[in-house]
Image (cartoon, rainbow, N blue to C red):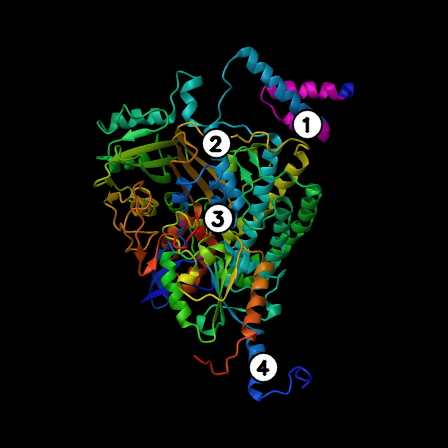
């Protein structure tokens, strides 16, 4: 390695350690560039060993509370805001930095507030997931919300029993709730109160049972066709 | 009058049934009926190990299987906090972008077929075959690859891969101009698609539409730029949005044109990735011996050719996922069909459906 | 008459008419495009420019009344199986079915926990040729079609079938 190259690599690594990756990425010669990247990895490892500080995390909301004790994760922040606006809806013991646990009673109002309030502006419902937590814990519905303007995201969980599960519907707040809730109803049997058209979406209308529950038993025949595996000796 | 379109019909999107309520020729309501391809993907995931889930994710969105795999492994690596080697990152980005081009070629070709143009279909499939040849060179499969594993990829790049892809890019970039000449600026195509099925940005966001459908309405949102994953921050590329060049912003033509421009952006990313890829490195170096993620859950999104592909994985510490939910972008795109096609004629409904670029395997899972 | 010279022996007329009919029916089977899932993409790729299905005489027809062969490409679910049966009954005789891909043959990768997946389309319609693969390469599908052609040619539609 010539002196020029060594010099170039040293400077590029120094700049990259301060956060400017362009110096490394702009090196034209591929061999030198890869050497610079290797030197950078080594330098970073040394720096981590000597300072013994956790390296800065990127955009994941879960880790916000670890490296900076003063700030909270978005989930904790919004749990506080919701609790102040709608008392008795947030279940404080079960909420954490990864999610907000809500009681089902006023979910529709909370949802409207989350969508319309200028500090929140959660205009995008990303995903509704139904979960079967087992016999003792019942079912749960999890909502992932995201804001296109403020770029923050939270997760809300609402628990319900598995005997007669009911959760208020938010399809009037986020239009995609319509289909997501129908799918959760189809797979788990959770009834969404206030939904204008709650019926099965993926399975046929005359299907029996809620497939994604852990205690689901497949029905024997459907319109005369045998459902479970028929052919012998396949296991 | 209530008409029934499907589930078997000449349009190539899959088994979709539309119950169309018309008033003469004008459509007043459409109810899509889905579930004809519900293959119990989530139940299978709960009963298979984390490695065995990957071929199932392939088969959900079978046109862009590399991107499906990518989304899953990015979510798993976030959950397990695995860092993959540089070479693996570059290989993944190259494969994902090649598959994005292949997926858009199929989407555009079949859209031409829906609207009545047979020639672009043949041209685009001819070019798509060249991409499938590249995939076959690498991992042996043409359509469903099982290529990206948690912590690495299944096969390293073969000898001569980089030259092959450069040859393909040199061949492909002038072809986009050819497609523009036959289809994009074709007078009949413009009359069929401009101003039809306008999707307003607020409606799109409320319905959770993402990807080229949202960008066609003028919203600049791309997970690769706004919530970057893997090494997408290192590449320099634009996000094309619809601007209503021949009609209203957010019409079918805009969604079509955004896909054409995205193919060009993907070629830019590919050229940069091929220049920078590290020449050596073991692709199986970071593969975990046994995948047992810590207890917890994660929701992670990546950009598939159809939009925001999200995986919600709940792990209970065992080698099998407790719950795995795939949030598919085409599901949300199809739900907006009713809103944007009211008041149009029946043949316009086919044009709108084609522009949304749905894949039933992903919707029904 | 150049095609028929020295091809058939001095037989009774019925036998050579059989062969003539077999030749006519097998060499241009129009297929009913029944693409359901991933195999449909490979079927489209087979019909596209590189592996051309037109050279063996097959054109995609969307109506069951105009088709001879139904290529069931992809997974058949319970919801869809009733429609497959209905469409098969709407096809006109002579009709044949090709089960393309492992999902149509026997349920495919979804055989174990697929509560909604039909474990093979032969539970609802009679299948003539099975093409394995997930998805089968276009060359495999073409071989399956050629095997179907052989099968059609060997049929004897005019001879009376005894018991």
Label 3 marks a residue whose chain is B
Q: Are marks 1 and 2 on the same chain?
A: no
Mark 3–mark 4 CB contact (< 8 Å): no
In the picture, measured across the screen, residue B83 lies left or right of residue A132, that is right
Which label's residue is closer to the chain start, 2 or 3? 3
Say left or right for B149 vs C9: left
Tell me the crowding category of disc 2: few under 14, some 14 to 19, or many 20 or more residues within 10 angstroms, Cα based.
Answer: some
Q: Could you tell me residue B251's position as x and y percent?
A: 46, 53
Task: Please state the chain letter of the residue tagged with numbered disc 2 in the rendered image.
Answer: B
- Disc 2 is placed on an element classified as loop
- Provide the residue designation for mark 3: B59
Q: Chain of mark 1?
A: A
Q: Quadrant of residue A177?
A: top left
Q: Which residues are magenta?
A: A5-31
Same chain under badges 1 and 3? The reply is no
Coordinates of residue B338 in the picture (x, y in percent): 36, 55
Q: Are marks 1 and 3 in contact (CB under 8 Å)?
A: no
Question: Which of pointers 1 and 2 indicates the residue nearer the eye?
Answer: 2
Check the image and report above or below for B99 versus B8.
above
Distance in Å between CA atoms under marks 1 and 3:
37 Å
The residue singled out by tag 1 in the image is A34
Residue at point 59%, 63% (across, down): C143
Instruction: Classify residue A3 as left or right of residue A222.
Output: right
Q: Nearer the viewer, mark 1 or mark 3?
A: 3
- Please tell me whether residue C56 belongs to the stretch shown in magenta: no
Q: Which residue is mark 2?
A: B291
Q: Count the marks: how many?
A: 4
Q: Residue at label 4?
A: C20
């Amino acid at each position: 390695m010539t002196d020029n190259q060594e010099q170039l690599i040293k400077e590029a690594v120094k700049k990259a350690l301060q956060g400017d990756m362009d110096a490394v990425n702009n090196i034209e010669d591929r061999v030198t560039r890869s050497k610079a990247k290797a030197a950078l990895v080594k330098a970073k490892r040394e720096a981590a060993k000597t300072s013994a500080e956790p390296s800065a995390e990127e955009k994941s909301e879960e880790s916000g509370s670890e490296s900076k004790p003063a700030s909270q994760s978005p989930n904790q922040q919004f749990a506080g805001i919701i609790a102040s606006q709608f008392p008795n809806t947030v279940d404080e013991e079960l909420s954490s930095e990864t999610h907000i646990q809500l009681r089902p009673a006023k979910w529709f109002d909370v949802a409207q507030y989350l969508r319309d309030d200028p500090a929140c502006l959660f205009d995008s419902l990303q995903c509704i997931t139904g979960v079967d937590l087992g016999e003792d814990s019942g079912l749960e519905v999890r909502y992932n919300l995201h804001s296109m303007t403020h770029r923050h995201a939270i997760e809300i969980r609402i628990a319900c029993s598995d005997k007669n599960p009911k959760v208020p519907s938010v399809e009037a707040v986020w239009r995609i709730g319509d289909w997501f809730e129908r799918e959760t109803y189809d797979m788990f049997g959770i009834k969404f109160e206030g939904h204008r058209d709650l019926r099965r979406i993926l399975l046929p209308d005359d299907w029996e049972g809620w497939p994604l529950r852990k205690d689901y038993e497949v029905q024997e025949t459907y319109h005369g066709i045998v459902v479970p595996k028929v052919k012998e000796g396949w296991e | 009058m209530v008409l029934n379109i499907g589930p078997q019909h000449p349009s190539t999107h899959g088994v979709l049934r539309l119950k169309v309520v018309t008033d003469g020729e004008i459509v007043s309501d459409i109810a899509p009926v889905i579930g004809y391809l519900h293959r119990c993907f989530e139940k299978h995931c709960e009963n298979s190990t984390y490695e065995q889930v990957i071929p199932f994710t392939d088969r959900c969105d079978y046109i862009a299987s590399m991107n499906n795999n990518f989304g899953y492994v990015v979510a798993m690596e976030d959950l397990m906090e695995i860092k993959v080697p540089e070479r693996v990152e570059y290989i993944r980005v190259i494969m994902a972008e090649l598959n994005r081009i292949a997926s858009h070629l199929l989407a555009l070709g079949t859209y031409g077929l829906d609207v009545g143009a047979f020639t672009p279909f043949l041209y685009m499939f001819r070019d798509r075959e060249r991409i499938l040849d590249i995939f076959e060179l690498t991992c042996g499969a043409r359509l469903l690859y099982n290529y990206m594993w948690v912590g690495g990829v299944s096969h390293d790049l073969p000898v001569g891969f980089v030259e092959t892809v450069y040859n393909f890019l040199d061949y492909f970039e002038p072809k986009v101009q050819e497609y523009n000449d036959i289809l994009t600026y074709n007078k009949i195509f413009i009359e069929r698609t401009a101003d039809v099925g306008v999707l307003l940005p607020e409606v799109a966001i409320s319905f959770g539409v993402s990807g080229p459908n949202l960008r066609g309405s003028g919203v600049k949102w791309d997970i690769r730029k706004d919530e970057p994953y893997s090494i997408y921050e290192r590449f320099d590329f634009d996000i094309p949005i619809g601007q209503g060049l021949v009609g209203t912003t957010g019409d079918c033509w805009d969604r079509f044109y955004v896909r054409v421009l995205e193919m060009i952006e993907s070629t830019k990313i590919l050229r940069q990735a091929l220049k920078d890829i590290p020449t050596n490195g073991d692709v199986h170096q970071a593969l975990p011996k046994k995948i047992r993620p810590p207890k917890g859950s994660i929701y992670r999104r990546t950009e598939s050719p159809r939009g925001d592909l999200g995986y919600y994985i709940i792990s209970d510490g065992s080698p099998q996922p407790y719950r795995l939910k795939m949030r598919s972008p085409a599901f949300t795109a199809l739900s907006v069909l009713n809103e944007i096609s009211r008041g149009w004629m029946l043949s316009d409904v086919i044009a709108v459906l084609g522009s949304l670029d749905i894949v039933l395997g992903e919707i029904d899972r | 008459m150049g095609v028929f010279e020295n091809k058939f022996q001095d037989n009774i007329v019925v036998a050579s008419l059989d062969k003539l009919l077999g030749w006519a029916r097998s060499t241009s089977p129009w297929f009913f495009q029944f693409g359901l899932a991933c195999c449909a993409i490979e079927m489209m790729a087979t019909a596209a420019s590189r592996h051309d299905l037109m050279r063996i005489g097959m054109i995609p027809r969307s109506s069951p009344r105009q088709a001879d062969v139904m290529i069931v490409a992809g997974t058949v679910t319970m919801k869809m199986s009733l429609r497959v049966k209905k469409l098969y009954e709407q096809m006109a005789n002579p009709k044949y079915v090709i089960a393309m891909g492992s999902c149509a043959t026997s349920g495919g990768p979804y055989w174990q926990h697929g509560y909604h997946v039909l474990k093979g389309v032969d539970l609802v319609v009679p299948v003539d040729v099975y093409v394995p693969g997930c998805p089968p390469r276009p060359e495999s599908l073409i071989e399956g079609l050629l095997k179907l052609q052989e099968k059609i040619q060997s049929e004897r539609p005019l001879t009376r079938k005894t018991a």
